[in-house]
Amino acid sequence: MSTVGKVIKCRAAVAWEVKGPFVIEEIEVAPPKAYEIRIKIYASGICHTDDHALGGFMAGITFPIILGHEGAGIVESIGEGVTCVKPGDRVIPLCNPQCGECVCCLHPDSNFCLKNDVGKNTGLMLDKTSRFSCKGKLIHNFMSCSTFTEYTVVDEIAIVKIDPKAPMDQVCLIGCGFSTGYGTVLNTAKVKPGSTCAVFGLGGIGISAVIGCKVAGAARIIGIDINKGKFAKGKELGCTECLDPNDYDKPIQDVIVEMTNGGVDYSFECVGKIDVMVSTIQASHFAFGNVNIIGVPPSTARLTIDPMWLLTGRTMNGAFLGDWKAKDSFPGLVKDAMDKKFDLGALVTHKLPFVKINEGFELMRDGKCVRTVLEM
Ligand code: APR
Ligand code: ZN
Ligand code: ZN
C-alpha cells in the first residue's frame, strides 16, 4: 500500500526537554508540501553538535525536537515542483543547504547559505511550519534535517542525490563530520604538500581533518588529545605523532613550537573549547601560521586574543561544513569515498540499532568512539 500523500506513523527519537534523554516514540510525519521531500532515513551518525543542542548550549534551540543532521536515506515521496530528486533516489539531507540564490550561495568563497537554520534554530521548515507531531504536540526539526527518525521531510534546498550504490552506513558521515574536518583542511586552509600540521582533538571532526592533511600531502601531522585512547586511530589514518597535553608541565603550544622550529604551518581546533583555541593559535608559527577554528563552543563563550598574534603575519580562519557548497560537492565526496580516496569506514568505530541512541550518546560522551552510526 502506497504511503504517498498520507501521514506516516513511524519511530523517532524525541528530545522532549533540554538534556534529554531521547525517548523512542511513535510520531506522525506529514506528507511533503510543494518543494519538499519525504525521506526514509537508513543511517545517521551521532555528532557532537547534536549533544551540544541537547544540552541547551545552542542559542534559540526549541524543544521538543528531533535532532540528528548526519544521515543518509532514500526518497519516499516528493512534493509539487520538486525536480532535483525522485522517489527511490539515495540522498543525503543537508544541514547547510544550498539555495543557489542568496548572496553566500552566489559568492565563490562561501557556502553559508542564508536559508540555513544555523544560529537561528527556528526548528521549522522554510514555510515556518513543522511536518512532525507526537501526542498532539508539534515537534521541531534540527538544522534543516532531523535524522534521528525513520522518516523526515526536508526542503528541496536541503537534499542532494548521491550514487545509488553508496553505502549509507558510511556516507551518512559526509552529511557533517567527515566533510567538516576534511573540507576545512582542503578548501579553507588549503594545506600544501610537505607542510607541518597540528590537529587538536581526535574525535570524528579531528580524525577527518587528519585524513585531509594526509590527502593534501602534509609531511608531519601532529594529533593532540587528552584521551590517549584516540591515538591508535589517529596514527592509523595519518598522524605522524600524537601528544597528550597532560604529559607535559608546560602549555602544549610551547611543546609544539619547540618540536617544530617555531610553530606549525597549519593548525586546526576540532574540540570547541576556548583554551584549546588559544593553544591552536599559539602552536602555529607567529609569522606564517594558518589557524583554523572548527570546534563549536557554547554560544555564550568568547575568545580573547592579543592582536599581535595576528599582526606578526598569522592568519585565522573559520569554516562551516568544511566550506563545501553541499549540493555541488557531496556527490563527488561520495564518489571519492567509494573510490577509496579516503577510508570513510575507518571513522565508524561503532554501529548501533537506532533504538539504542542513548547508549550511542554515552559512547561519545565517554570518549569511546570516533563515530557511532545508528541504523534505522
Ligand atoms: N585538548 C585536546 N583534546 C581535547 C580536549 C583538550 N583540552 N578536550 C577534549 N578533547 C578531545 C576529546 O577527547 C575528543 O577526542 O576532543 C575530541 C572531541 O571529539 P568528539 O567529542 O568526537 O567531537 P566531534 O564530533 O569531533 O566535534 C568536535 O567540532 O563540530 C564541532 O560541535 C563540534 O565542537 C565540536 C567539535
Ligand atoms: Zn543560499
Ligand atoms: Zn555535525
Image (spheres, rainbow, N blue to C red):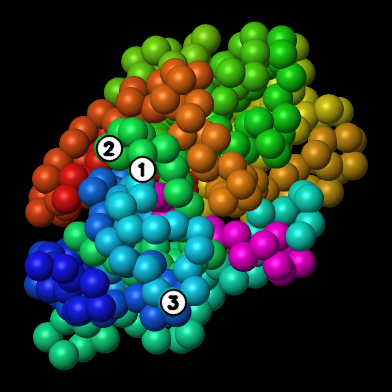
Which one is earlier in the sequence, the residue at label 1 or at label 3?
Answer: 3
User: In the rendered structure, which segment of residues is drawn in magenta?
Assistant: 91-105
Q: Quadrant of the N terminus?
A: bottom left
Q: Where is residue 75, by image quadrant?
A: bottom left
Q: Which residue is mark 1?
A: 172
Q: Which residue is mark 2?
A: 169
Which residue is at the front of the view, 280 or 157? 157
* Amino acid at the residue labelled 1: Cys
Q: Secondary structure at mark 3?
A: loop
- Image mark count: 3
Tell me what residue is drawn at x 50 percent, y 26 percent.
336
Tell me whether the residue at label 1 lies in contact with that at label 2, contact meaning CB atoms closer than 8 angstroms: yes
Q: Quadrant of ligand 2?
A: bottom right
Please tell me how crowded label 1 is: few (under 14), some (14-19), or many (20+) other residues with Cα within 10 Å. Answer: many
Tell me what residue is drawn at x 70 percent, y 60 percent.
105
Tell me whether the residue at label 3 lies in contact with that at label 2, contact meaning CB atoms closer than 8 angstroms: no
Measuring from the top left, give residue 322's x and y in whole percent: 59, 43
* Residue 146 visible in the displayed image: yes
Q: Which residue is mark 3?
A: 80
Mark nearest the camera among 1 and 3 is 3
Mark nearest the camera among 3 and 2 is 3
The relative height of residue 254 versus residue 268 in the rendered view (above or below) is above
Measuring from the top left, give residue 135's x and y in whole percent: 12, 86
Measuring from the top left, give residue 248's x and y in whole percent: 49, 21
Which residue is at the front of the view, 159 or 318? 159
* Residue 364 visible in the displayed image: no
The relative height of residue 16 versus residue 71 in the rendered view (above or below) is below
Please tell me how crowded label 3 is: few (under 14), some (14-19), or many (20+) other residues with Cα within 10 Å. Answer: few
What secondary structure is the stretch in magenta mostly built from? loop
The relative height of residue 258 versus residue 97 in the rendered view (above or below) is above
